[in-house]
Image: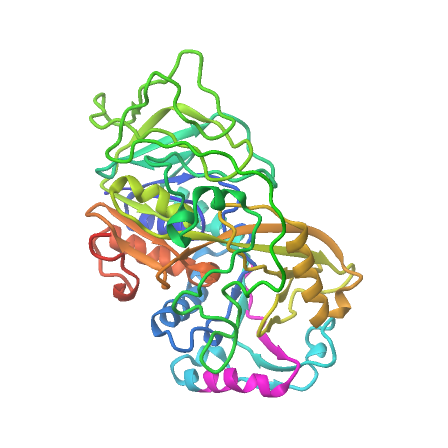
């Protein structure tokens, strides 16, 4: 069976790994879009403290956490996975009681969390912490390096015969895949965002998911609070997740913003050929002097369905250029694991999937000469998490912002993360800031993750929100099973796209 996987983040890489292991001929399309969530995620694996009243979300993340030890053994290489435990911290010990009760209730079904204990002096385990904090220790919690996991999965898939192509993938109305190769060098870390070529530029994923206009989605500056989706409501409490997963209400008016660019449309129905007149390209793109080139077919001489027209991205500034020649890749099945871009990729199929981006900004700092490799994860009920990695590195994050496709590190975002981090860990005051990362977490507006078939040949797997590195590899295995017509390792009914999406 020939399977194309659109997206090379942790879900797509995992799908390719399991598909290739079952003998499928796999092609992975790596869009390389700035803001992909996997490359920015901190790597916290502690599912037992969240989604207290959402069994579907909890099952997915719990099984994702259980999946890791076996995966580590299979891959046989260092992916940054280590069971370092997690400290749940609060100023008032009474604030820990709801999560203590939750962990007690879940322990019989998840003994892998370990025996939860009180920690009188959490700074003994994570030295920079304030000495005013109380804590619970969840010893089974782990951290993982998302980029290392993804890269190891892709390497293993390629070793089994999978192919990785770089470019922007598009679908036609009948589910055929066309890939437009990049026509310029890789972009810098802080370059603006762009979406893959698409059949309809009238609505961006941010617009579809949050009800904003294309201009609002493009501006990328205002932190617009969104209504919490089911399973991600608010901040910690007796019936809510311990970790913050949705934006908090603003405490001051949003800052002024600049102008927003006009948007261009493209035909929505079907998959029209590239016209000879100027076609909207990703902003800053230029066509070749010879004009558009008919699409190439990598497996036959007759490409019966022309590729979709390329439409502009929903973000400001100059984006990358794509070749005008779309190459068709024949496939029996397609898995779309394109993160926050999934809704746009699938729109030519005639389905509306309200997947939108939720920005997270993360700071990496180093404490010269300090061994931070086995420091536990620090999870306050609200505000930033902290965790240590080898090489004296500490990660602090992340912001939770609904700003559309704006994968930029901002002054306000850095200030929020650093100020909140120093409140709970004043010992980091002298740490050296070495890097800031930004990622667009994919959020499915109805609430749960989105996993399942949207047509008889296209499967989607996205919407993991802040839990991508927890559940990503397991979600990829589910998607692979669905593409192969096998029984998935988890009932997908709660995550399946609505009938007639």
Residue farthest right in this picture: 430
Residue 130 on the magenta segment: no
Q: Quadrant of the N terminus?
A: top left
Residue 96 on the magenta segment: yes
Q: Is residue 78 visible?
A: no
Placement of 470 over or under 192, stated as above or below? below
Residue 376, given in percent of the width and then of the height, sits at 62, 71
Please tell me which residue is depicted at 31% across the width and 23% down the height of the picture: 296
Placement of 297 over or under 477, stated as above or below? above
Q: Is residue 358 left or right of residue 448?
A: right
Q: Is residue 289 visible?
A: yes
Q: How many marks?
A: 0
Q: In the depicted view, which residue is nearer to us: 391 or 246?
A: 246
Residue 122, given in percent of the width and then of the height, sits at 68, 79
Residue farthest top in this picture: 290
Please tell me which residue is depicted at 35% across the width and 47% down the height of the picture: 343
Q: Which residues are magenta?
A: 80-104
Q: In the depicted view, which residue is nearer to us: 155 or 429?
A: 429
Placement of 128 over or under 223, stated as above or below? below
Please tell me which residue is depicted at 45% across the width and 45% down the height of the picture: 155
Please tell me which residue is depicted at 64% across the width and 49% down the height of the picture: 410
Q: Is residue 234 left or right of residue 489?
A: right
Residue 88, given in percent of the width and then of the height, sits at 59, 77
Q: Is residue 91 left or right of residue 79?
A: right
Residue 455, given in percent of the width and then of the height, sits at 21, 48
């Amino acid at each position: 069976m020939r399977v194309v996987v659109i997206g090379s983040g942790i879900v797509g890489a995992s799908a390719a790994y399991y598909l290739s292991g079952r003998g499928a001929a796999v092609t992975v399309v790596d869009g390389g879009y700035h803001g992909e969530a996997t490359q920015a995620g901190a790597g916290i694996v502690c599912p037992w403290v969240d989604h207290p009243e959402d069994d579907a979300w909890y099952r997915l993340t719990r099984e994702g956490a259980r999946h890791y030890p076996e995966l580590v053994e299979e891959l046989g290489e260092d992916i940054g996975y280590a069971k370092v435990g997690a400290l749940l911290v609060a100023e008032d010990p009474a604030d820990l009681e709801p999560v203590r009760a939750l962990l007690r209730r879940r322990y019989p079904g998840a003994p892998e969390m370990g025996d939860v204990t009180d920690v009188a002096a959490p700074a003994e385990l994570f030295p920079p912490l304030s000495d005013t904090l109380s804590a619970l220790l969840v010893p089974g919690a782990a951290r993982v390096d998302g980029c290392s996991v993804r890269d190891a999965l892709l390497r293993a898939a390629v070793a089994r015969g999978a192919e990785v192509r770089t470019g922007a993938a598009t679908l036609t109305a009948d589910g055929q895949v066309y890939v437009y190769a990049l026509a310029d060098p890789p972009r810098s870390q802080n370059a603006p965002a762009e979406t893959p070529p698409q059949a309809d530029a009238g609505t961006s994923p941010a617009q579809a998911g949050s009800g904003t206009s294309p201009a609002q989605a493009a501006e990328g500056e205002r932190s617009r609070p969104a209504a919490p989706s089911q399973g991600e409501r608010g901040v910690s409490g007796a019936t809510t997740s311990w970790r913050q997963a949705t934006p908090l209400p603003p405490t001051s008016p949003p800052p002024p913003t600049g102008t927003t660019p006009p948007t261009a449309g493209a035909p929505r129905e079907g998959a029209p050929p590239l016209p000879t007149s100027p076609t909207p390209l990703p902003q800053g793109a230029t066509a070749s002097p010879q004009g558009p080139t008919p699409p190439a077919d990598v497996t036959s001489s007759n490409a019966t369905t022309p590729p979709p027209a390329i439409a502009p991205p929903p973000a400001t500034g100059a984006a990358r250029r794509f070749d005008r020649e779309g190459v068709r890749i024949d496939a029996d099945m397609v898995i779309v694991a394109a993160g926050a871009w999934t809704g746009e990729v699938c729109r030519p199929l005639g389905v509306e999937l309200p997947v939108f981006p939720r920005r997270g900004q993360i700071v990496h700092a180093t404490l010269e000469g300090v061994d931070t490799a086995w420091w536990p994860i620090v999870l306050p009920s609200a505000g930033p998490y902290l965790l240590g990695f080898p090489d004296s590195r500490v990660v602090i994050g992340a912001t939770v912002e609904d700003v559309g496709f704006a994968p930029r590190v901002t002054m306000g975002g850095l200030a929020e993360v650093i100020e909140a981090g120093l409140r709970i860990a004043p010992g980091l005051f002298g740490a050296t800031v070495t890097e800031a990362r930004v990622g667009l977490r994919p959020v499915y507006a109805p609430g749960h993750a989105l996993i399942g078939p949207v047509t008889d040949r296209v499967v989607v797997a996205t919407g993991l929100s802040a839990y991508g590195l927890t559940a990503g590899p397991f979600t990829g295995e589910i998607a692979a099973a669905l593409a192969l017509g096998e029984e998935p390792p988890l009932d997908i009914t709660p995550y399946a796209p609505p009938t007639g999406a």
